[in-house]
Amino acid sequence: MQSHQWAHRLPDWRAAAMAGVAGGVVFLVLDLMASALSGAGLWAPTHMIAAIVMGSGALASPASFSFGIVVTALIVHFVLAIAMGLILGLIMAPFHFDSSWGMASAVGAVFGLAVYLFNFYGMTSFFPWFAEARGWITLIAHVIFGIVMADAYLKMEAKEEDRSGSALA
């Protein structure tokens, strides 16, 4: 049985970044589908994300497609997803939360919940338009994001022996 006490152990940075991308892809698909099905329009989430760097002017015509807004949103979204993957890796590795699929999934779910709370209750003082996206669907999408990211990290990470080079054959 693996101890979940802190130990000096760095994450596999490549796996953490790629896990962020994997979680980001799944989250983006869920977010776009939920937005389209809710009647807000397929492109509404891209306008909200792009407005983080472009300002509130990007929120005009949220149902319309804009190449510049979509590209900006994708860049912002995946930079943030990779950052979240790196943060999750920093949590999982030293506490050995990557010891099993169940543990990784549970930690990922809690991480996704924490990201949701931070984004939609903390960051809304800077980006107030995200308050309108609060709700169960967004919460569930964030929990799934965290689970996918944690499980992808567990699947992709190099074993400690491989990272240290001692067990390479």
Image (cartoon, rainbow, N blue to C red):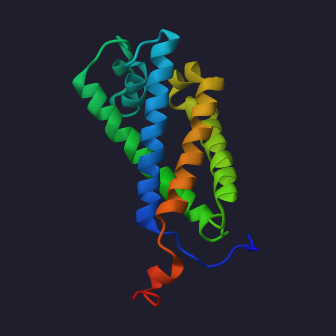
- Measured along the vertical axis of the image, is residue 67 above or below residue 37? below
Where's the N terminus, which quadrant?
Answer: bottom right
Percent x, y for residue 49? 41, 30
Extreme-front residue of the structure = 169
Q: Which residue is at a point 66% across and 45% down the rendered structure image? A: 109
Say which of 155 and 34 sits in front.
155
> Where does residue 78 sit, x and y in percent of width and height?
38, 44
Q: Is residue 42 above or below residue 152?
A: above
Horizontal arrangement in the rendering, residue 164 relative to residue 103 (left or right): left
Q: Quadrant of residue 42?
A: top left
Which residue is located at x 69 percent, y 51 percent?
Answer: 106
Looking at the image, residue 165 sits to the left or right of residue 116; the answer is: left
Which residue is at the front of the view, 36 or 168? 168
The number of numbered discs placed on residues in the rendered structure image is: 0
Quadrant where the C terminus is found in the figure:
bottom left
Q: 56 or 37, which is in the foreground? A: 37
| Residue 72 location (% of width, % of height) | 30, 34
Residue furthest to the left: 67
Relative to 161, residue 87 above or below: above
Q: On screen, 138 above or below 106? A: above
Q: Residue at x 58, y 46 (%)?
A: 146
Residue 138 spot, x, y in % from top left: 58, 28
